[in-house]
Image (cartoon, rainbow, N blue to C red):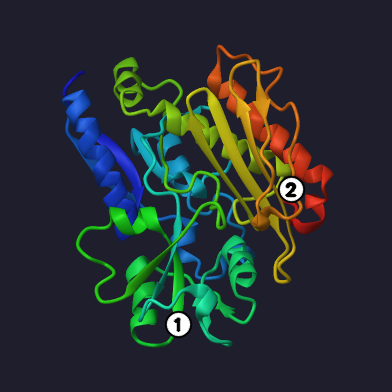
Amino acid sequence: MTAGALRLGTRRSALAQAQSGQVAQALEQVSGRRVELVPITSEGDTNRASLSEIGGQGVFATALRDALLRGECDLLVHSLKDLPTTVPDGLVIAAIPARADARDVAVTRDGTPLHELKAGSTIGTGSPRRIAQVHVRNPRLRTVDLRGNVDSRLQRVASGELDAVILAAAGLSRLEGDPIGALKVESLGLAEWPTAPGQGALAVETTADAPVDLLAALAALDDEATRIAVTAERAVLAGLDSGCQAPMAAHAELSGADLRVRAVVYAPHDGWRIGIDVTEALRPGTVEAEGSAEEYIQANGRGNGADSADGADPIAAAREIGSSVAHRLLERGAADLLPRS
């Protein structure tokens, strides 16, 4: 590569800069160039209204993408779960590194599990999906809208203002030091508590006409198994035609040539949900659909979502599987539970 520092655009939060710093270090190793962070303020950082009110779709990404298109930076790092499913003209997601822990965690003062917290306990989260999942896990709890950085959220539990907060495990793991301190963490299993499409994964974005050497360096950071899984998850979200703040979850896992996708759409408050748990082959051939677990009470997902997929292109196959899952959720009535984007 030619000399000169690469400019990596990132949100200003401690978490965003921590995860961008990790990508910067990896990129320096493969490119041989210094990478400097360029802090950018997004609407999601300045607007303190609930994400469900301002619309989660793109509130953390638009300002960064505008800066990239203006040439103020050479690449961006996003939390993939916050990224709209449509990539603007002129941009490309050049790398999706290996995903961190995709689970949510509940953080409390004494380690009491969510399902055992007493009636009226206050749980902090601004996510419609998490709000719905809290009500499924323990209908006696009261959710409180929550914004702010990880430290401020944890402090509200430590001070006794809240009894628990729901956070992404990946975010906690990427922060330096020990953000949890004396607080206790309950990991929420993906089988009962699937998370947002792309959760735990990062997206490294640049311009479609970026220098070939930059694109090659970013390609070296890409993890194919993660890209396949999150492609399916985001295809579910796109197929449901709803935004990043929709009360839905999708998690995919790759095992050999088989892709398992678990997706659920939730009613906001009454515990009703519609879900599918399906394993399909990325290559043409055997398609196995698994019976639904108790948490997926409306699901039974049998179908041929991957039968026509081109096995030579696993990304296209994953996208088709995710689209098929979305179609089957809609057939089961998921549209009645979703806000339209």
Q: Quadrant of the N terminus?
A: top left
Residue at 39% of width from left, 88% of height from top?
160
Quarter of the image where one finds residue 286: top right
Residue at 29% of width from left, 53% of height from top?
174
Task: Say which mark, if any, is on residue 163.
Answer: 1
Residue at 69% of width from left, 49% of height from top?
242
Amino acid type, label 1: Asp
Side of 314 where 163 appears, left or right: left
Visible residue check, residue 88: no
Q: Is residue 234 above or below residue 51?
A: above
Q: Position of residue 314 (x, y in %)?
A: 54, 20
Residue at 22% of width from left, 58% of height from top?
176
Task: Say which mark, if any, is on residue 299.
Answer: 2
Q: Position of residue 173 (x, y in %)?
A: 30, 55
- Circle 1: element type: loop
Quarter of the image where one finds residue 300: top right
Within 10 angstroms of label 2, few (less than 14), some, or many (20 or more) residues?
Answer: many
